[in-house]
Amino acid sequence: MQAVKPVEILTVDLSSREITRDKIEDVELIKKYIGGRGIATYSLLSSMDPEVDPYSPESPIVFAPGVLTGTIVPCSGRTTVLFKSPATGRLFKTNVGGHFGAQLKFAGYDILVVKGRAEKPVYLYIEDDRVEIRDASHLWGKDVRETNRLVREENDDPEVQLACIGPAGENKVVYASIQVSIYNAAGRGGGGAVMGDKNLKAVAAKGTKGIRAAHPEKFMETVAGLWNKMNEVSGVKPLSDYGTSIGIESTNAIGAFPVKNYQQGNIDNVKYLTGTYLVEGGFLKRKISCYSCPVACHRFVTVDEGKYRGVYTGGPEYETLSALGGGCLSTDTAGVIKANELCNILGLDTISTGNCIQWLMECKQRGVVSDGDAGGLDLTWGNSETIIDLVGKIAHRQGIGDLLAKGLKAASEELGRDSYKWAIQARGLEQSRVETRSAFGYALAFAVNSRGPDHLNTECLAEFGGSPEARALIKRITGSEEYAYPHTTEKRADIVRWHEDIYGASDALGICAFPTTAQFWMDEWDLAGLFRNFTGIEVSHEDMMRAGRRMIVMERCFNAMLGHTREDDVLPYRLMNEIQHDAMHDNAINSAELLDKMKDEYYALHCWDIEKGLPTKETLCELGMGDLIEKITGYIELK
Amino acid sequence: MKLFMVNPEKCTGCHLCELACSFNKHGVFNRELSNIRVENDEDRALNVPVKCMQCDDAPCIASCVTRALFKDLETGAVLWDKDRCIRCKACVIACPFGCVSLVRKERSTNISICDLCSGQPKCIEVCREKAIDYVDENRINNKKREKTFYKVLNQKDGGMQNG
């Protein structure tokens, strides 16, 4: 058998304080699942009882940097975090940039599994072979900024990298984030709450070991080729200059910017929410890169005047400007930055936080909640101070914040009175800031996403045909550029599945989704070339895509074991039942009928059981995943 | 001669320069082995690339009793003669910037100083922001002068031109 670099797995049990190290050396297994997200998902699916409570010691949290993380490959600094979500009750994959993953790799670990629950607050310290569970009582209650400062200080090492939680995670807000490198967030799904439940304040990593490629020269040639492509495509410069919020003005212009809790498709004075304004208004001070990223789309902003003078933070991203700005009918740039800073340092997902605040404001609009119910806060649309107050109240579970901290699904059930109709969530996850009524590929992608309705398992931006590269990709997938048009159900299944596949492969390699699914300068051939020259394992571009597909199939199987079927592949009530009249096309709605048509096509394309929306035994065998059938059929029947 | 220029305001902290250096010198991706290091304060998002300044009056050279360190006359880089060196490490102590480092290789200890890759620094090739650059010393002020020129022109002609 071919000798390859094994996948090094570090497992820490916080209950027994046991620390174990394992290796995966099976080349076939590595070829099938690549590494990172792929191998982490495989090991959870094959070893974990899916029915365990997310808040139980048996429910692990896994940190899995990509195969290429820590290398010179551009945009390769990303880390997958896997856990069972307290928000959705399902398997949840989050993915985060920053510098933590690279340090974990330099310390010699590909995957870190944390199980159990510590009796008292602890943090995990990893420096090469030294792995220690340390007391964190002095860090408990501290915000993310302070936690980073203290851990670096006590180790006398400014280079140690943290993945940590803030007060929101300690208080188990179901959308508490894990903050990496202070301003990067594994935000969605409540990983922060899972860490909080484990009494795990932080994982600190520092490594001094090097990483070697199997074929160094060829590897560097592949990397050089990618630099050339990066310099040629149209999308990299604007992203680098103006950040992820570069597209807000055009999204607003076509009535596809979710405003006022998805009641409107656009907002007046949108310019104050754009990346251009962050530059021109003097907020942007520096650009920030994740590890090994030459693009630097992340922002560092400060507010230098007005009532929020002195505020500074990483961000705000597109999602944040929408969730805490436009979505709440606010265009107060400084106010959004202040709310963003609080989310970062208190450890909250900005998307869910914003959606919850919008829901509450609409509750007032519809007379279901009064200002008095909110402890005297003025819940009028667009009130920046209220938004900022609520962020703090959610993190600390104070007053009405305690209701919002449960997430929209639980909060709307508790409040009742039709409030589910404007709770923009499905399967327990608040929808990310995409107006799926104007983008049917996104609608399908969000409906079938194992996480819930969001863009981070499948970003199918290409369907808008916004760049020559996007149109070329759509042509490659569907055979015609005509399908680079988002108001049709035609070919959406093909587009979504392609994106899911490459997203999985990118995640497993640690590569950001922007090069593969937004600026289009890395394709499946590039990914295969990088993997081949790095590991020495022969793979084709098709192997990479099939590996990505296996991740989707595994997530679906995990959730199916908990009862998930096609009935659960839905979108929030409003999007399925109310037309968005600001859209550029008629009948802008994600009706059940529309979704059903696309779902049928999507399941069929996957060769799944269309009736249940689940993989069949045959699909699993065809993908070489027959070994998982026994485990899965212990819970549910497969066709 | 060319000068190695560092502009921390432009550095985004991607650390690619470190990886390019360690790969070029040692065939491995390891910032610990890099001759350029990016120091950072994450909270304020400040990143500062630090490397050998190629001092004219180099304290490291002055500290070397065996003359194992000397100047490359073409590039101005400080070079190291491993046969003359007795590994006393005086140069490590002498460098005010912390840019002379020790690299353990198998059983030997090596002194590591940026040698400007014999006039073609690998690190600058991966700096998309040009936070580090290698420029002809006669041209280092050209861009700044040009900028000043357009600033004046803009003031005089009301923004007809942009620099």
Image (cartoon, coloured by chain):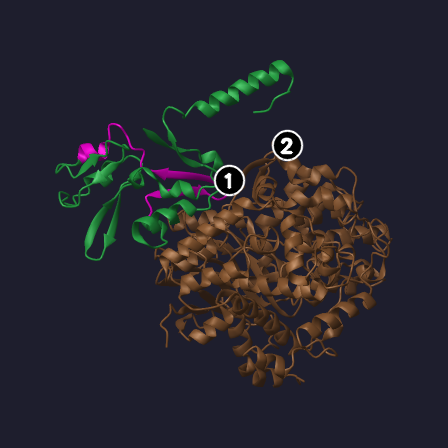
Chain colours: A brown, B green
> Looking at the rendered structure, which numbered label has been put on residue A280?
2
Q: Position of residue A538 (x, y in %)?
A: 44, 69
- What's under tag 2, amino acid-wise? Glu
Which residue type carries mark 1?
Answer: Arg
Task: Assign the N terminus of chain A to one quadrant of the image.
Answer: bottom left
Q: Chain of mark 2?
A: A
Q: Secondary structure at mark 1?
A: loop
> Which quadrant holds residue A359?
bottom right
Please tell me whether residue B47 belongs to the stretch shown in magenta.
Answer: yes
Q: CA distance from mark 1 to mark 2?
A: 20 Å
| Residue at the image point whose x is 46% and y is 65% from the top | A112
Residue A400 seen in this snapshot: no
Q: In the rendered structure, the residue with mark 1 lies on which chain?
A: B
When the figure is inspected, residue A435 is found, relative to residue B145, above or below; the finding is below
Secondary structure, mark 2, is helix
Disc number placed over residue B44 in the picture, else none = 1
